[in-house]
Image (cartoon, grey):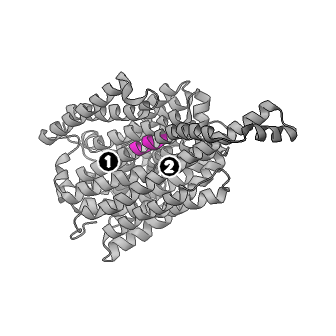
Amino acid sequence: MAATAAIEADSGAPPQLTGMRLYIATIACSLGSFLALLDVSVANVSVPHIAGALGVSPTQGTWIITSYAVAEAIGMPLTGWLAKRYGALRTYLVAMGGFMVASALCGAVPSLAMLVVARVLQGACGAPLLPLCQTLTMRIFPGGRTPTALAITAMVSVMAPVLGPILGGTITDNISWRWIFYLNIPFVAIAILLCHRLIGPYETKTAPARIDYVGLILVVVAVGAFQLTLDLGREYDWFNSTMIVTLAIVAAIGFAAFLIWELTEEHPVVDLRVMRHRGFWAACLCMAVGYASLMSTTVMVPLWVQTTLGYPATDAGWVVAPSSMFSMIMVPLCGMLVTRTRLDPRFLACCGLLWVALVATLRAHSTPDLEMWQIAAPQALQGISNSMIMMTLSIVAINAVDLDEIPSATGLLAFVRTIGTAIGISLATTGWDSGGRVARADLVGELNGAEEAIARMATGGMSELQSRSMLEAMIDAQSRTVAFDHVFTLMATLAAFTALLIWIIPRPGKRRI
């Protein structure tokens, strides 16, 4: 994305901003990107509340996360074309306006279906905000201070996930889950006004640019059908349902048609020709699989502690937040190790994935009687691996392609990472839900002395109905925890496999970034 930003800049820019105007413009420009990234994580800890308010199960509630991620992934490849055709600032302002409208709709919807539609719109409008924030920040900073501009956008990228779970949990518990979306509105409005006033003279040049409409339609159909297959499969008994079979066929045909079209189109919406570089496609594969295992925990853990352990959303947010805090600390350290030493970035990525496997193994031994610190500690350790994986694999991937292919490569890498995350979340939550039902049936079948336990509770002053309800709650908590542990065992296996997969990437040559 940084490469995309650099290409958007041109030598005809007006004199640079200085002093307080520069700082205000930087904050205003970063605010849109910050809010788009914040909305990726702010809803994670609110899923049980949203699901309960809309009358759906918590696993169905995760659609509000996957729909946002998929829409964002589909929208990313269009950013370069939009900026070239209409200008980076104009595109940024329109995207922020759409994001503000979508946020208002998210807060006002009465049903899950309408919320998913609003989240799709929000994700599509949020997709251009991060790369265009980099573009505009680099344009307003004085010459020679590009690293400062990139450092600011990088800090925004790691701060948002830290604040997201905490802010989402606090607002949900003390006000309403709807306000996690409404809160975007005033800040986006202020950012639009300030960006228009201060950054207006720094608009990028525009030029006629055609868009690959066929490729865009194919990727929307293929990715949308595939995500619906994952999200709806559990409810409709997977391939015993004609609808799920139809969606799977549409997804398969759509992907095949997309591959054929994009490889033969002169101006593809996603330039798949960069996949001819083994270093790039191997890094993309590792990024997708690694993030499927890594990012699922950001949804699974808050869901488990709220639905099984009875945590309020605020406490769930504090359980998840340490992961992002450690990621923030690791960003500069990983950058220094990769850019200032001769350390093989593949080794660092491999260590990061093995760390994910280790933490997931620790998590796979969870029980319903864990203390809060025992849950938060592995989550904090998880954050160490995030930067190790994302930064190093990004560097390896970009250095594997030709210089003129960097913009296409960065967009495709972001697309692959986001799709991998959405698929991982869908599979993990589906596996947890179905595994919980299986574990419950097994526990009930092996339960001994139930009547004696009910009798003992009755002697303690509980009615028979209360005693049976408590016993059932204990069985539910244990079965959901067993399924939770099984999911993390699979995550650990997947992460360890990806750590081995890293070594199919050729040793990086001379580094460009």
Which contiguous range is marked in magenta?
A: 422-429
Q: Amino acid at mark 2?
A: His
* Helix, strand or loop at mark 1: helix
Looking at the image, residue 192 lies above or below residue 374: above
Q: Residue at (19%, 34%) from the top-left corner?
A: 257
Q: Which residue occupies the foreground of this view, 506 or 23?
A: 506
Which residue was labeled with disc 2?
Answer: 486
Q: Residue at (50%, 37%) from the top-left corner?
A: 434
Q: Residues within 10 Å of mark 1 (few under 14, many from 20)?
A: many
Q: In the displayed structure, does residue 134 sit left or right of residue 109?
A: left
Q: From this viewpoint, which residue is outermost toward the bottom?
A: 341
Q: In the displayed structure, does residue 292 sit left or right of residue 42?
A: left
Asked whether residue 376 appears in the rendered view, the answer is yes
Q: Which mark is residue 426?
A: none
Q: Residue at (54%, 56%) from the top-left corner?
A: 363
Q: Which residue occupies the foreground of this view, 257 or 183?
A: 257
Q: Which residue occupies the foreground of this view, 505 or 459?
A: 459
- Measuring from the top left, give residue 337's x and y in whole percent: 38, 73
Q: Amino acid at mark 1?
A: Val
- Measuring from the top left, give residue 484's x and y in whole percent: 54, 47
Q: Which mark is residue 416?
A: 1
Asked whether residue 21 appears in the rendered view, the answer is no
Counting residues from the N terminus, which is met first, the one under dot 1 or under dot 2? 1
* Chief secondary structure of the magenta portion: helix
